[in-house]
Amino acid sequence: MTAASVAGLRPPGPRSHRPVEILPDHVANQIAAGEVVERPASVVRELAENALDAGARRIDVHVRGGGKAEIRVADDGCGMARDDAILAVERHATSKIRTAADLQRIRSLGFRGEALPSIAAVSLFQLHTAAENGDGVRVRVDFGKIRGVTPKPRAPGTTVSVRMLFRDIPARAKFLGTNATETRAAAQAVTLLALANPGAGFRFVSSGRVLLDVEPDQSGLERIDALWHGIGATLLSVNGGGRVGVRGFVQRPDAATKGGRRFLMVGNRVVSDPVLMRVVDEAYRTTTPDGARPAVFLRLVFEAGDVDLNVHPAKSEVRFQDRRAVETAVAEAIREALSSLESAHAISGRGHEGPGSADQEPLTSAHPAAAQPEVVALFEEAAGVEAFADIETAKPEIWQLHNRYILAPTREGMLIIDQHAAHERVLYERIMARFSGDPGETQTLLFPVPVRLSPDEMLTVEDTSGLLRRIGFRFEKLGQSTVVITEAPQPHPRFDGEACFRDMIRELTEGSPLVDSAHRQQDKIARSMACKGAIKAGDPLSPEEARELFDSLFATELPAHDVHGRPAAIRLATAELDRRFGRS
Protein backbone atom coordinates (compact mmCIF):
# COMPACT_ATOMS: atom_id res chain seq x y z
CA MET A 1 0.00 0.00 0.00
CA THR A 2 1.44 3.35 -1.01
CA ALA A 3 1.60 6.47 1.11
CA ALA A 4 -0.77 8.16 -1.30
CA SER A 5 -3.42 5.46 -0.91
CA VAL A 6 -3.04 5.55 2.88
CA ALA A 7 -3.71 9.30 2.79
CA GLY A 8 -6.78 8.70 0.67
CA LEU A 9 -5.21 10.11 -2.50
CA ARG A 10 -5.10 8.60 -5.94
CA PRO A 11 -1.61 7.38 -6.90
CA PRO A 12 0.05 9.43 -9.64
CA GLY A 13 -0.65 8.21 -13.15
CA PRO A 14 1.78 8.06 -16.03
CA ARG A 15 3.43 11.37 -16.86
CA SER A 16 1.97 13.21 -19.81
CA HIS A 17 2.65 16.54 -21.44
CA ARG A 18 -0.16 19.12 -21.43
CA PRO A 19 0.18 22.35 -23.37
CA VAL A 20 0.21 25.72 -21.57
CA GLU A 21 -3.03 27.62 -22.20
CA ILE A 22 -4.55 30.95 -21.22
CA LEU A 23 -7.47 30.37 -18.85
CA PRO A 24 -10.92 31.52 -19.93
CA ASP A 25 -11.97 34.82 -18.37
CA HIS A 26 -14.70 33.29 -16.19
CA VAL A 27 -12.23 30.77 -14.70
CA ALA A 28 -9.61 33.45 -14.07
CA ASN A 29 -12.26 35.63 -12.42
CA GLN A 30 -13.33 32.79 -10.11
CA ILE A 31 -9.72 32.21 -9.10
CA ALA A 32 -9.30 35.92 -8.38
CA ALA A 33 -12.53 35.87 -6.40
CA GLY A 34 -11.07 33.23 -4.12
CA GLU A 35 -8.55 35.77 -2.81
CA VAL A 36 -11.19 38.39 -2.03
CA VAL A 37 -14.43 36.51 -1.36
CA GLU A 38 -13.95 33.89 1.32
CA ARG A 39 -17.51 34.02 2.68
CA PRO A 40 -20.51 36.39 2.78
CA ALA A 41 -18.79 38.50 5.45
CA SER A 42 -15.99 39.23 2.94
CA VAL A 43 -18.56 40.63 0.52
CA VAL A 44 -20.14 42.75 3.26
CA ARG A 45 -16.76 44.14 4.30
CA GLU A 46 -15.63 44.96 0.75
CA LEU A 47 -18.89 46.67 -0.19
CA ALA A 48 -19.04 48.66 3.05
CA GLU A 49 -15.42 49.75 2.63
CA ASN A 50 -16.20 50.92 -0.90
CA ALA A 51 -19.09 52.93 0.51
CA LEU A 52 -16.81 54.59 3.07
CA ASP A 53 -14.28 55.44 0.37
CA ALA A 54 -17.12 57.04 -1.59
CA GLY A 55 -17.74 59.40 1.33
CA ALA A 56 -20.88 57.70 2.60
CA ARG A 57 -22.42 59.11 5.76
CA ARG A 58 -24.89 56.29 6.13
CA ILE A 59 -24.45 52.61 5.20
CA ASP A 60 -27.29 50.09 5.36
CA VAL A 61 -26.48 46.37 5.17
CA HIS A 62 -29.21 43.73 4.73
CA VAL A 63 -28.56 39.99 4.58
CA ARG A 64 -30.77 36.94 4.13
CA GLY A 65 -29.75 33.38 4.88
CA GLY A 66 -26.52 34.51 6.48
CA GLY A 67 -25.68 36.33 3.24
CA LYS A 68 -25.76 33.16 1.18
CA ALA A 69 -29.21 34.01 -0.21
CA GLU A 70 -28.77 37.78 -0.50
CA ILE A 71 -26.56 40.67 0.54
CA ARG A 72 -27.61 44.25 -0.11
CA VAL A 73 -25.44 47.25 0.79
CA ALA A 74 -26.80 50.75 0.20
CA ASP A 75 -24.96 54.02 0.82
CA ASP A 76 -25.34 57.77 0.29
CA GLY A 77 -21.83 58.28 -1.07
CA CYS A 78 -20.77 60.06 -4.24
CA GLY A 79 -22.05 57.32 -6.57
CA MET A 80 -20.87 56.77 -10.15
CA ALA A 81 -21.78 57.86 -13.65
CA ARG A 82 -22.85 55.31 -16.27
CA ASP A 83 -19.43 54.72 -17.86
CA ASP A 84 -17.69 54.40 -14.48
CA ALA A 85 -20.31 51.91 -13.30
CA ILE A 86 -19.66 49.69 -16.31
CA LEU A 87 -15.87 49.88 -15.87
CA ALA A 88 -16.19 49.12 -12.15
CA VAL A 89 -17.20 45.52 -12.85
CA GLU A 90 -14.22 44.95 -15.14
CA ARG A 91 -11.02 43.42 -13.74
CA HIS A 92 -8.13 45.77 -12.89
CA ALA A 93 -10.36 48.84 -12.98
CA THR A 94 -10.04 51.34 -10.10
CA SER A 95 -10.44 55.01 -9.30
CA LYS A 96 -7.89 54.97 -6.45
CA ILE A 97 -4.47 54.48 -8.07
CA ARG A 98 -2.81 55.39 -11.34
CA THR A 99 0.82 54.24 -10.93
CA ALA A 100 2.71 51.56 -8.98
CA ALA A 101 4.08 54.30 -6.72
CA ASP A 102 0.52 55.01 -5.53
CA LEU A 103 0.51 51.61 -3.79
CA GLN A 104 2.90 53.06 -1.21
CA ARG A 105 0.53 55.95 -0.43
CA ILE A 106 -2.80 54.20 -0.07
CA ARG A 107 -5.16 56.06 2.24
CA SER A 108 -8.41 54.45 1.12
CA LEU A 109 -9.95 51.27 2.51
CA GLY A 110 -10.05 49.70 -0.94
CA PHE A 111 -10.21 50.48 -4.62
CA ARG A 112 -13.66 51.38 -5.91
CA GLY A 113 -14.26 48.49 -8.29
CA GLU A 114 -11.33 46.34 -7.11
CA ALA A 115 -13.56 43.74 -5.44
CA LEU A 116 -16.67 44.19 -7.59
CA PRO A 117 -15.61 41.97 -10.53
CA SER A 118 -14.52 39.23 -8.10
CA ILE A 119 -17.88 39.34 -6.31
CA ALA A 120 -19.78 39.53 -9.60
CA ALA A 121 -17.91 36.45 -10.87
CA VAL A 122 -19.45 34.23 -8.17
CA SER A 123 -22.98 35.61 -7.79
CA LEU A 124 -26.03 37.19 -9.34
CA PHE A 125 -24.87 40.78 -9.05
CA GLN A 126 -26.57 44.17 -9.48
CA LEU A 127 -25.00 47.61 -9.18
CA HIS A 128 -27.44 50.52 -8.94
CA THR A 129 -25.70 53.90 -8.67
CA ALA A 130 -26.08 57.59 -9.38
CA ALA A 131 -23.62 60.47 -9.16
CA GLU A 132 -24.57 63.96 -8.01
CA ASN A 133 -26.96 65.42 -10.60
CA GLY A 134 -26.81 62.08 -12.46
CA ASP A 135 -29.72 60.06 -13.84
CA GLY A 136 -28.80 56.74 -12.29
CA VAL A 137 -27.88 53.44 -13.89
CA ARG A 138 -28.27 49.73 -13.07
CA VAL A 139 -25.65 47.18 -14.17
CA ARG A 140 -26.60 43.50 -13.96
CA VAL A 141 -23.93 40.75 -13.99
CA ASP A 142 -24.67 37.01 -13.79
CA PHE A 143 -21.66 35.02 -12.59
CA GLY A 144 -19.15 37.19 -14.43
CA LYS A 145 -21.15 38.02 -17.56
CA ILE A 146 -22.73 41.47 -18.00
CA ARG A 147 -26.40 40.90 -18.78
CA GLY A 148 -27.70 44.42 -18.95
CA VAL A 149 -27.06 48.13 -18.42
CA THR A 150 -30.25 50.13 -17.99
CA PRO A 151 -31.09 53.64 -16.78
CA LYS A 152 -32.81 53.73 -13.39
CA PRO A 153 -33.29 56.84 -11.24
CA ARG A 154 -31.75 56.94 -7.79
CA ALA A 155 -30.66 59.51 -5.21
CA PRO A 156 -26.87 60.04 -5.21
CA GLY A 157 -25.14 56.94 -3.85
CA THR A 158 -24.82 53.24 -4.60
CA THR A 159 -26.71 50.04 -3.87
CA VAL A 160 -25.09 46.68 -4.55
CA SER A 161 -27.17 43.51 -4.47
CA VAL A 162 -25.47 40.09 -4.34
CA ARG A 163 -27.63 36.95 -4.59
CA MET A 164 -26.94 33.22 -4.83
CA LEU A 165 -23.33 33.54 -3.72
CA PHE A 166 -21.18 30.59 -4.90
CA ARG A 167 -24.14 28.90 -6.62
CA ASP A 168 -21.94 27.97 -9.57
CA ILE A 169 -19.07 26.86 -7.28
CA PRO A 170 -20.56 24.13 -5.06
CA ALA A 171 -17.09 23.18 -3.81
CA ARG A 172 -16.86 26.62 -2.18
CA ALA A 173 -20.48 26.74 -1.05
CA LYS A 174 -20.30 23.50 0.94
CA PHE A 175 -17.59 24.92 3.21
CA LEU A 176 -19.73 27.85 4.36
CA GLY A 177 -21.14 27.75 7.89
CA THR A 178 -24.72 27.71 9.01
CA ASN A 179 -26.89 30.77 8.45
CA ALA A 180 -26.36 31.81 12.07
CA THR A 181 -22.57 31.43 11.78
CA GLU A 182 -22.37 33.47 8.58
CA THR A 183 -24.68 36.14 10.02
CA ARG A 184 -22.42 36.53 13.06
CA ALA A 185 -19.37 36.88 10.81
CA ALA A 186 -21.09 39.53 8.68
CA ALA A 187 -22.26 41.42 11.78
CA GLN A 188 -18.70 41.34 13.14
CA ALA A 189 -17.38 42.80 9.90
CA VAL A 190 -19.84 45.70 10.10
CA THR A 191 -19.10 46.20 13.81
CA LEU A 192 -15.36 46.55 13.17
CA LEU A 193 -15.93 49.08 10.40
CA ALA A 194 -18.34 51.00 12.63
CA LEU A 195 -15.73 51.05 15.41
CA ALA A 196 -12.99 52.37 13.12
CA ASN A 197 -15.24 54.92 11.36
CA PRO A 198 -17.29 56.80 13.97
CA GLY A 199 -18.06 59.56 11.47
CA ALA A 200 -20.40 57.26 9.50
CA GLY A 201 -23.67 55.69 10.59
CA PHE A 202 -24.20 51.93 10.15
CA ARG A 203 -27.27 49.73 10.13
CA PHE A 204 -27.15 45.93 9.91
CA VAL A 205 -30.34 43.95 9.32
CA SER A 206 -30.59 40.15 9.13
CA SER A 207 -33.80 38.74 7.61
CA GLY A 208 -35.73 41.81 8.79
CA ARG A 209 -34.20 41.90 12.28
CA VAL A 210 -32.11 44.97 13.16
CA LEU A 211 -28.90 43.78 14.86
CA LEU A 212 -26.92 47.03 14.74
CA ASP A 213 -27.89 50.68 14.32
CA VAL A 214 -25.45 53.48 15.20
CA GLU A 215 -25.70 57.15 14.30
CA PRO A 216 -23.03 59.11 12.40
CA ASP A 217 -20.75 61.77 13.90
CA GLN A 218 -20.15 60.03 17.20
CA SER A 219 -16.94 60.53 19.16
CA GLY A 220 -14.70 57.51 19.58
CA LEU A 221 -15.98 56.90 23.12
CA GLU A 222 -19.61 57.36 22.09
CA ARG A 223 -19.19 54.82 19.29
CA ILE A 224 -17.56 52.28 21.63
CA ASP A 225 -20.38 52.67 24.14
CA ALA A 226 -22.98 52.38 21.37
CA LEU A 227 -21.47 49.10 20.21
CA TRP A 228 -20.78 47.66 23.68
CA HIS A 229 -23.08 49.40 26.10
CA GLY A 230 -21.61 50.34 29.47
CA ILE A 231 -17.95 49.71 28.72
CA GLY A 232 -17.20 53.40 28.17
CA ALA A 233 -17.36 54.18 31.90
CA THR A 234 -14.40 51.83 32.51
CA LEU A 235 -12.10 53.29 29.85
CA LEU A 236 -9.11 55.62 30.15
CA SER A 237 -8.12 58.05 27.41
CA VAL A 238 -4.82 57.40 25.59
CA ASN A 239 -3.06 60.18 23.72
CA GLY A 240 0.57 59.39 22.92
CA GLY A 241 2.59 61.76 20.74
CA GLY A 242 5.76 61.53 18.67
CA ARG A 243 6.35 60.24 15.17
CA VAL A 244 3.93 57.40 15.93
CA GLY A 245 0.69 58.72 17.40
CA VAL A 246 -1.28 56.46 19.74
CA ARG A 247 -4.88 57.48 20.34
CA GLY A 248 -7.90 55.78 21.82
CA PHE A 249 -8.89 54.11 25.06
CA VAL A 250 -7.74 51.35 27.40
CA GLN A 251 -9.63 49.80 30.28
CA ARG A 252 -9.05 50.46 33.95
CA PRO A 253 -7.23 47.46 35.41
CA ASP A 254 -9.91 46.79 38.02
CA ALA A 255 -12.54 46.42 35.26
CA ALA A 256 -10.55 43.87 33.21
CA THR A 257 -12.13 40.49 32.53
CA LYS A 258 -10.84 37.26 31.00
CA GLY A 259 -12.41 38.09 27.63
CA GLY A 260 -11.71 41.81 27.15
CA ARG A 261 -12.29 43.25 23.66
CA ARG A 262 -9.06 44.32 21.99
CA PHE A 263 -8.88 46.27 18.77
CA LEU A 264 -6.01 47.93 16.97
CA MET A 265 -6.79 50.41 14.21
CA VAL A 266 -4.54 51.82 11.50
CA GLY A 267 -6.18 54.47 9.41
CA ASN A 268 -9.87 53.57 9.29
CA ARG A 269 -9.41 49.82 9.45
CA VAL A 270 -9.11 47.31 12.30
CA VAL A 271 -5.97 45.20 11.86
CA SER A 272 -4.47 42.19 13.59
CA ASP A 273 -1.06 42.31 15.27
CA PRO A 274 -0.49 39.70 18.02
CA VAL A 275 2.96 41.11 18.80
CA LEU A 276 1.53 44.52 19.65
CA MET A 277 -1.11 42.87 21.82
CA ARG A 278 1.71 41.26 23.79
CA VAL A 279 3.22 44.74 24.18
CA VAL A 280 -0.14 45.85 25.59
CA ASP A 281 -0.09 42.96 28.10
CA GLU A 282 3.44 43.89 29.15
CA ALA A 283 2.38 47.52 29.66
CA TYR A 284 -0.33 46.29 32.07
CA ARG A 285 2.18 44.14 33.96
CA THR A 286 1.56 44.08 37.75
CA THR A 287 -1.70 46.06 37.42
CA THR A 288 -4.09 43.19 36.59
CA PRO A 289 -4.59 39.69 38.02
CA ASP A 290 -3.14 36.79 36.06
CA GLY A 291 -5.44 35.88 33.16
CA ALA A 292 -7.27 39.21 32.99
CA ARG A 293 -7.43 40.91 29.57
CA PRO A 294 -8.27 44.62 29.71
CA ALA A 295 -10.27 45.99 26.80
CA VAL A 296 -8.18 48.01 24.35
CA PHE A 297 -9.27 50.36 21.56
CA LEU A 298 -6.15 51.91 20.04
CA ARG A 299 -5.65 53.84 16.81
CA LEU A 300 -2.12 54.28 15.43
CA VAL A 301 -1.39 57.47 13.48
CA PHE A 302 1.58 57.52 11.09
CA GLU A 303 3.33 59.94 8.82
CA ALA A 304 3.12 59.17 5.11
CA GLY A 305 5.29 56.21 4.14
CA ASP A 306 5.77 54.83 7.65
CA VAL A 307 3.25 52.00 7.23
CA ASP A 308 2.42 49.65 4.36
CA LEU A 309 -1.33 49.00 4.23
CA ASN A 310 -1.20 46.77 1.15
CA VAL A 311 0.48 43.60 2.42
CA HIS A 312 -2.51 41.30 3.02
CA PRO A 313 -5.27 40.18 0.60
CA ALA A 314 -7.93 40.71 3.25
CA LYS A 315 -6.25 43.93 4.45
CA SER A 316 -6.21 42.59 8.02
CA GLU A 317 -2.47 43.13 8.54
CA VAL A 318 -0.05 45.99 7.97
CA ARG A 319 3.74 46.35 7.94
CA PHE A 320 5.53 49.05 9.94
CA GLN A 321 8.72 50.68 8.72
CA ASP A 322 10.03 50.97 12.30
CA ARG A 323 8.34 48.31 14.42
CA ARG A 324 10.44 49.02 17.50
CA ALA A 325 9.29 52.66 17.50
CA VAL A 326 5.66 51.51 17.25
CA GLU A 327 6.02 49.06 20.14
CA THR A 328 7.73 51.69 22.30
CA ALA A 329 5.04 54.28 21.53
CA VAL A 330 2.21 51.87 22.42
CA ALA A 331 3.84 50.78 25.69
CA GLU A 332 4.62 54.34 26.80
CA ALA A 333 1.14 55.62 25.93
CA ILE A 334 -0.57 52.87 27.94
CA ARG A 335 1.74 53.25 30.94
CA GLU A 336 1.08 57.00 30.92
CA ALA A 337 -2.69 56.36 30.98
CA LEU A 338 -2.31 53.84 33.82
CA SER A 339 -0.21 56.27 35.86
CA SER A 340 -3.09 58.74 36.19
CA LEU A 341 -5.41 58.87 39.17
CA GLU A 342 -8.29 58.04 36.80
CA SER A 343 -6.93 54.48 36.55
CA ALA A 344 -7.69 53.87 40.23
CA HIS A 345 -10.78 51.87 41.13
CA ALA A 346 -13.80 54.09 41.78
CA ILE A 347 -16.50 53.39 44.36
CA SER A 348 -19.87 53.67 42.65
CA GLY A 349 -23.09 51.79 42.04
CA ARG A 350 -26.30 51.31 43.93
CA GLY A 351 -25.01 48.80 46.47
CA HIS A 352 -25.41 49.41 50.20
CA GLU A 353 -22.65 48.76 52.66
CA GLY A 354 -23.72 47.81 56.18
CA PRO A 355 -22.62 49.82 59.21
CA GLY A 356 -19.36 49.00 60.92
CA SER A 357 -19.22 47.33 64.32
CA ALA A 358 -19.36 49.49 67.41
CA ASP A 359 -15.97 48.41 68.73
CA GLN A 360 -13.95 49.44 65.67
CA GLU A 361 -10.86 51.56 66.27
CA PRO A 362 -11.45 55.31 65.90
CA LEU A 363 -10.32 57.31 62.89
CA THR A 364 -6.85 58.54 63.79
CA SER A 365 -5.57 61.80 62.32
CA ALA A 366 -2.14 61.60 60.75
CA HIS A 367 -2.01 65.35 60.33
CA PRO A 368 0.84 66.74 62.51
CA ALA A 369 -0.94 68.96 64.99
CA ALA A 370 0.26 68.42 68.53
CA ALA A 371 3.86 67.57 69.32
CA GLN A 372 4.63 63.95 68.44
CA PRO A 373 7.23 61.67 70.00
CA GLU A 374 10.39 61.26 67.97
CA VAL A 375 10.13 58.31 65.53
CA VAL A 376 12.43 56.59 63.09
CA ALA A 377 11.37 57.15 59.46
CA LEU A 378 9.59 54.09 58.14
CA PHE A 379 10.27 54.79 54.46
CA GLU A 380 13.13 56.13 52.43
CA GLU A 381 12.54 59.76 51.50
CA ALA A 382 10.71 60.06 48.18
CA ALA A 383 12.70 62.23 45.80
CA GLY A 384 10.98 64.39 43.20
CA VAL A 385 7.42 63.69 44.32
CA GLU A 386 4.84 65.18 41.98
CA ALA A 387 1.35 64.70 43.39
CA PHE A 388 -1.56 64.01 41.07
CA ALA A 389 -3.34 67.08 39.75
CA ASP A 390 -6.48 65.89 41.52
CA ILE A 391 -4.88 66.00 44.98
CA GLU A 392 -6.37 68.98 46.77
CA THR A 393 -3.09 70.49 47.99
CA ALA A 394 0.59 69.66 47.71
CA LYS A 395 0.43 68.38 51.31
CA PRO A 396 -3.17 67.25 51.90
CA GLU A 397 -4.36 66.34 55.36
CA ILE A 398 -4.29 62.56 55.70
CA TRP A 399 -5.53 60.01 58.24
CA GLN A 400 -4.92 56.36 59.03
CA LEU A 401 -8.09 54.30 59.43
CA HIS A 402 -8.12 51.07 61.51
CA ASN A 403 -4.35 50.68 60.99
CA ARG A 404 -5.10 49.55 57.43
CA TYR A 405 -6.03 52.47 55.23
CA ILE A 406 -4.81 56.00 54.58
CA LEU A 407 -7.40 58.62 53.66
CA ALA A 408 -6.66 61.83 51.75
CA PRO A 409 -9.00 64.50 50.32
CA THR A 410 -9.01 65.38 46.62
CA ARG A 411 -10.79 68.11 44.67
CA GLU A 412 -13.44 65.60 43.55
CA GLY A 413 -13.77 63.56 46.73
CA MET A 414 -11.25 61.43 48.56
CA LEU A 415 -8.63 58.74 48.10
CA ILE A 416 -8.60 55.54 50.15
CA ILE A 417 -5.17 53.90 50.11
CA ASP A 418 -4.41 50.35 51.24
CA GLN A 419 -1.18 50.77 53.19
CA HIS A 420 0.12 47.25 52.48
CA ALA A 421 -0.68 47.44 48.75
CA ALA A 422 0.80 50.93 48.55
CA HIS A 423 4.05 49.84 50.19
CA GLU A 424 4.19 46.83 47.87
CA ARG A 425 4.13 49.18 44.87
CA VAL A 426 6.82 51.40 46.39
CA LEU A 427 9.12 48.46 47.20
CA TYR A 428 8.54 46.74 43.85
CA GLU A 429 9.57 49.74 41.78
CA ARG A 430 12.61 50.43 44.00
CA ILE A 431 13.74 46.81 43.77
CA MET A 432 13.37 46.79 39.99
CA ALA A 433 15.42 50.01 39.84
CA ARG A 434 18.19 48.35 41.86
CA PHE A 435 18.56 45.59 39.30
CA SER A 436 19.71 48.16 36.77
CA GLY A 437 21.41 50.67 39.06
CA ASP A 438 22.69 51.16 42.58
CA PRO A 439 21.86 48.09 44.73
CA GLY A 440 21.02 50.42 47.61
CA GLU A 441 21.84 50.28 51.29
CA THR A 442 22.10 47.07 53.27
CA GLN A 443 22.48 46.39 56.96
CA THR A 444 25.14 44.12 58.39
CA LEU A 445 23.47 41.78 60.84
CA LEU A 446 24.74 41.90 64.41
CA PHE A 447 24.51 38.11 64.50
CA PRO A 448 24.65 36.14 61.20
CA VAL A 449 21.46 34.16 60.69
CA PRO A 450 21.61 30.52 59.54
CA VAL A 451 18.72 29.43 57.30
CA ARG A 452 18.13 25.73 56.66
CA LEU A 453 16.75 24.98 53.18
CA SER A 454 15.37 22.00 51.29
CA PRO A 455 17.39 20.71 48.31
CA ASP A 456 15.02 22.46 45.86
CA GLU A 457 15.22 25.71 47.81
CA MET A 458 19.02 25.51 47.83
CA LEU A 459 18.97 25.19 44.02
CA THR A 460 16.78 28.29 43.86
CA VAL A 461 19.25 30.24 46.00
CA GLU A 462 22.14 29.12 43.81
CA ASP A 463 20.27 30.03 40.61
CA THR A 464 19.30 33.49 41.87
CA SER A 465 22.28 34.33 44.08
CA GLY A 466 23.41 37.23 41.88
CA LEU A 467 19.96 38.83 41.88
CA LEU A 468 19.53 38.30 45.62
CA ARG A 469 22.80 40.14 46.21
CA ARG A 470 21.64 43.00 43.98
CA ILE A 471 18.65 43.58 46.24
CA GLY A 472 20.77 43.57 49.39
CA PHE A 473 21.08 40.01 50.72
CA ARG A 474 24.61 38.76 51.48
CA PHE A 475 25.02 35.13 52.50
CA GLU A 476 27.43 32.24 52.55
CA LYS A 477 26.75 28.59 51.91
CA LEU A 478 27.32 26.32 54.90
CA GLY A 479 27.19 22.66 53.99
CA GLN A 480 24.62 21.23 51.61
CA SER A 481 21.45 22.54 53.22
CA THR A 482 22.21 25.82 55.01
CA VAL A 483 23.04 29.40 54.08
CA VAL A 484 24.17 32.03 56.58
CA ILE A 485 22.79 35.54 56.00
CA THR A 486 25.30 38.22 56.94
CA GLU A 487 23.64 41.32 55.41
CA ALA A 488 20.05 42.17 54.50
CA PRO A 489 18.23 45.08 52.89
CA GLN A 490 16.52 47.56 55.19
CA PRO A 491 13.38 48.96 53.52
CA HIS A 492 11.92 49.94 56.92
CA PRO A 493 12.77 49.43 60.60
CA ARG A 494 10.17 46.67 61.07
CA PHE A 495 11.56 44.58 58.23
CA ASP A 496 12.37 40.98 59.22
CA GLY A 497 15.14 39.98 56.81
CA GLU A 498 15.24 36.32 57.85
CA ALA A 499 11.48 35.79 57.50
CA CYS A 500 11.41 37.64 54.18
CA PHE A 501 14.30 35.54 52.82
CA ARG A 502 12.66 32.26 53.90
CA ASP A 503 9.23 33.14 52.50
CA MET A 504 10.64 34.53 49.27
CA ILE A 505 12.80 31.46 48.54
CA ARG A 506 9.88 29.16 49.35
CA GLU A 507 7.59 31.08 46.99
CA LEU A 508 10.17 31.16 44.18
CA THR A 509 10.67 27.41 44.58
CA GLU A 510 7.09 26.21 44.97
CA GLY A 511 5.42 28.90 42.89
CA SER A 512 2.35 31.06 43.49
CA PRO A 513 -0.02 33.10 41.31
CA LEU A 514 2.09 36.15 42.13
CA VAL A 515 5.40 34.86 40.79
CA ASP A 516 3.99 32.44 38.21
CA SER A 517 2.53 35.37 36.24
CA ALA A 518 5.96 37.04 35.97
CA HIS A 519 8.02 36.31 32.89
CA ARG A 520 11.49 37.22 34.14
CA GLN A 521 13.43 36.12 37.19
CA GLN A 522 14.05 39.74 38.22
CA ASP A 523 10.32 40.40 38.18
CA LYS A 524 9.59 37.27 40.21
CA ILE A 525 12.06 38.28 42.90
CA ALA A 526 10.88 41.90 42.99
CA ARG A 527 7.23 40.88 43.31
CA SER A 528 7.92 38.32 46.01
CA MET A 529 10.15 40.56 48.13
CA ALA A 530 7.78 43.52 47.77
CA CYS A 531 4.92 41.38 49.04
CA LYS A 532 6.88 39.81 51.87
CA GLY A 533 8.73 42.98 52.89
CA ALA A 534 5.88 45.51 52.84
CA ILE A 535 4.23 46.74 56.00
CA LYS A 536 1.11 44.78 56.87
CA ALA A 537 -2.53 45.62 57.37
CA GLY A 538 -2.86 46.27 61.10
CA ASP A 539 0.52 47.97 61.51
CA PRO A 540 0.00 51.36 63.18
CA LEU A 541 1.75 54.25 61.44
CA SER A 542 2.88 57.50 62.97
CA PRO A 543 1.76 60.69 61.21
CA GLU A 544 5.24 61.03 59.68
CA GLU A 545 5.21 57.44 58.48
CA ALA A 546 1.78 57.78 56.89
CA ARG A 547 2.91 60.98 55.17
CA GLU A 548 6.08 59.35 53.86
CA LEU A 549 4.16 56.37 52.53
CA PHE A 550 1.68 58.68 50.82
CA ASP A 551 4.45 60.72 49.18
CA SER A 552 6.44 57.63 48.23
CA LEU A 553 3.41 56.01 46.58
CA PHE A 554 2.77 59.02 44.37
CA ALA A 555 6.41 59.08 43.31
CA THR A 556 5.99 55.64 41.70
CA GLU A 557 5.08 55.00 38.08
CA LEU A 558 1.79 53.19 38.79
CA PRO A 559 0.56 54.39 42.20
CA ALA A 560 -3.02 53.16 41.84
CA HIS A 561 -2.10 49.45 41.63
CA ASP A 562 -0.25 46.90 43.74
CA VAL A 563 1.85 44.06 42.31
CA HIS A 564 -0.96 41.46 42.53
CA GLY A 565 -3.22 43.33 40.11
CA ARG A 566 -5.37 44.67 42.95
CA PRO A 567 -6.01 48.36 43.67
CA ALA A 568 -3.62 50.25 45.92
CA ALA A 569 -5.85 53.34 45.85
CA ILE A 570 -9.61 53.76 45.44
CA ARG A 571 -11.44 56.95 44.50
CA LEU A 572 -14.62 57.99 46.30
CA ALA A 573 -16.24 60.93 44.53
CA THR A 574 -18.16 63.62 46.36
CA ALA A 575 -20.94 63.11 43.82
CA GLU A 576 -21.25 59.47 44.93
CA LEU A 577 -21.45 60.54 48.58
CA ASP A 578 -24.09 63.15 47.69
CA ARG A 579 -26.11 60.50 45.86
CA ARG A 580 -26.01 58.09 48.78
CA PHE A 581 -27.02 60.81 51.22
CA GLY A 582 -29.90 61.83 48.96
CA ARG A 583 -28.40 65.17 47.93
CA SER A 584 -28.40 64.47 44.19
Image: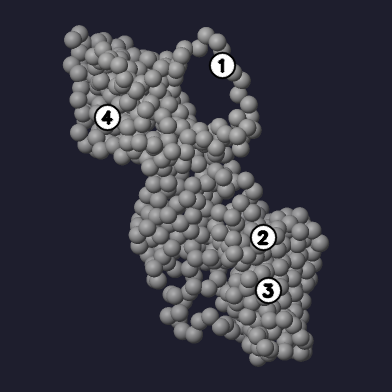
Whether residue 19 is visible to the viewer of this picture, yes or no, is no
Q: Are marks 2 and 1 in contact (CB under 8 Å)?
A: no
**Closer to the observer: label 4 or label 1?**
1
Residue type beneath disc 3: Asp
Q: Could you give the CA–CA distance between mark 2 and mark 4, rounded to whole angstroms?
A: 55 Å
Q: Could you give the CA–CA distance between mark 3 and mark 4, rounded to whole angstroms?
A: 63 Å
Crowdedness near tag 3: few (<14), some (14–19) or many (≥20) residues, C-alpha within 10 Å: many
Q: Residue at x 63, y 71 (%)?
A: 57
Residue type beneath disc 1: Gly
N-terminal-most mark, 4 or 1? 1
Picture quadrant of residue 392: top left
Total residue callouts: 4
Q: Secondary structure at mark 2?
A: strand
* Residue at image mark 1: 356
* Residue at image mark 2: 214
N-terminal-most mark, 1 or 3? 3
Residue type beneath disc 2: Val
